[in-house]
Image (spheres, rainbow, N blue to C red):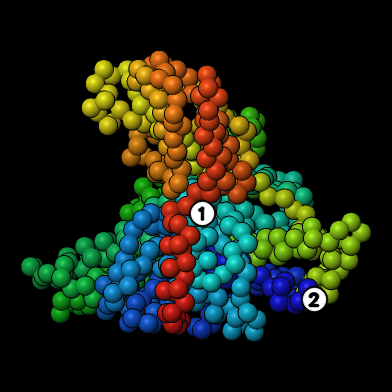
Amino acid sequence: MSDRDLQVFGIDLGTTYSAIAYVDETGRPTVCRNTDSNETTPSVVFFENETNVVVGSVAKNSAIIDPDRVVSLIKRQMGSDAEFEFHGTTYTPESISALILKQLAQDAAAHTGREVTRAVITVPAYFGMLERSATKNAGRIAGLDVIGIVPEPVAAALHYEATTDAEDKTILVYDLGGGTFDTTVIRVSKDEIVVVCTDGDDHLGGADWDLRLRNHLLAKFLEQAPKGTEVEDDEEFLQSLTTTAEETKKQLSRAESRAVALRGAGVSARVEVTRAQFEDETRDLLDKTIDIVRRTLKTLQTKEPGAQIDDVLLVGGSTKMPAVAERLRAEFGWEPKLHDPDLAVAKGAALYALGRVVHREMQEASGSDVAEAVQEVARQTGISARALEDLATKQTRNVLPKAFGVKLVDTSDPDWRSKPTRHFVKHLVHANDSLPTEERLLEAVTVEEGQTGVEIELYEQSGVVAGPELSENKPINEGRGLIDGLPPLPVGSPVNIRMTVDDEGLLELTATEPSTGKSLDIKVRVSVRSDEEVEAATKVVAGITVTG
Ligand SMILES: Nc1ncnc2c1ncn2[C@@H]1O[C@H](COP(=O)(O)OP(=O)(O)OP(=O)(O)O)[C@@H](O)[C@H]1O
Ligand SMILES: [Mg+2]
């Protein structure tokens, strides 16, 4: 066992900011600073030329003068088949995320003087299996060995437990980041971190607050500018307005009001914004988060009647807006705690990652050697054996983020054959089902007289709410198959479908035609890309120089 084998990192790949952490010799999770000496790096990529990309604050600033060559908020597109082209090369959301990861890994290597190969990457709790696998692929494309994908609130809860000794508590994590919002109820104890339920909105975050403030600043600017002033074509002004809006927003978390100097289209203006005004303009956004909290509490009551929330943790940079805690206090009577909102996720991921590595060492060592294996890790890392063992034996249990189902056809409409809209998705396993799921059964029936084959197609829910429409679901790559060669069956013959999903998102489906016993087995780890595509992207990214 070499020293290098134990080095492992936790990465918070955020919509707007990312961070990378490891557990230091004292057992403390530590965030690596980047080339700007900051603990977080803007998740922004600037495609400078064929072989060079810039990631971080320089890229973010480049957006002002070169918006067409800059990509931000890529996390919102993870799991989609979006494509981007720069300097003749095609990029996917995974490969663009990989460029961010590559920069983080380089920064961590410079910070620690160690090679960065193994990592755990975090994802929003309600990221479906498709988005999770896209995130894992992003890591692979960046050349990392991704030993785990962990929900952000689980990482935050792990860090909370490690730093506060919170024993047997039910906590609600309210995570409002740059691009996404989620609320998760987690039961935390010494031995276990159990996700009870989760909910969220993948298009709600600080960036939306920025946009509101930007529009407000723009309106005030135009009020002061001479009549007929045109700024729509002034990309540079509009981009800088977005940056100014974010800066001003952050300042308003501390100050009651700010004066902002704006210059564009040859006009200078001074705009005064108050926190009260800003809160007014964004109240509906905050309302949305409150609705989601209510929905989460409702799910909690359905799953565990009478369950109480002991603590509320605020994570994500946007929870520094005072309105968040104030509103939660007013609505629910809670006393929310700001818990290292910018870094808790990366730090928790680092703890989780180390726990996995020690766990593996313990599993590999047989019987009485287990204590020795832990001692060995303790010796090499400097972390106490006790602390390592605690980390390694802590179990985390998740819930299924999004529903899975099969495509069926509704034959109650006599014209169903000519109406593709009659196809819908029947969900068998549902969001917030504990993982691994219990086996779920569905008895489907054949729809044509004399049918000799049955086609099965798997879908994952794509939106936050699980609707049956095909457009509300995404087909799963390699998630289809056919039972064929059946004797002509009378219409309405049964087809039994069973489905389970394990901890790691491995979906297993068996469909059986009972009269012949013929069956179809589908076993898929949900993914948008094939291994070949991932490999090809890995080559492209390996050939690109990334700088901070
Ligand atoms: N002091 C502050 N006041 C208000 N907002 C802030 C403050 N500091 C940071 N933010 C905002 O927090 C957001 C970034 O938070 P964070 O880094 O937690 O998000 P992220 O991890 O990029 O996003 P996500 O978790 O949604 O993927 C940005 O929108 C940023 O403007
Ligand atoms: Mg985040």
Q: Nearer the viewer, residue 74 or 427?
A: 427
Does mark 1's beta carbon lie closer than 8 Å to ligand 1? no
| 14 versus 395 height, above or below | below
Q: Amino acid at mark 1?
A: Arg
Which residue occupies 33% across, 81% down?
Answer: 50
Q: Quadrant of residue 452?
A: top left
The answer to whether residue 304 shows anywhere in this view is: yes
Looking at the image, can residue 244 be seen? Answer: no
Q: Which mark is residue 380?
A: 2
Going by the image, does 66 lie left or right of 517? left
Residue linked to disc 1: 132
Which class describes the residues within 10 Å of circle 2: few (<14), some (14-19), or many (20+)? some
Residue at position x 50%, y 55% in the image: 133
Residue type, mark 2 in image: Gln
Instruction: Give whichever of discs 2 and 1 has the lower sequence position.
Output: 1
Count how many numbered circles sit on residues in the image: 2
Residue plotted at (28% across, 19% down): 413
Q: Position of residue 146 (x, y in %)?
A: 59, 64
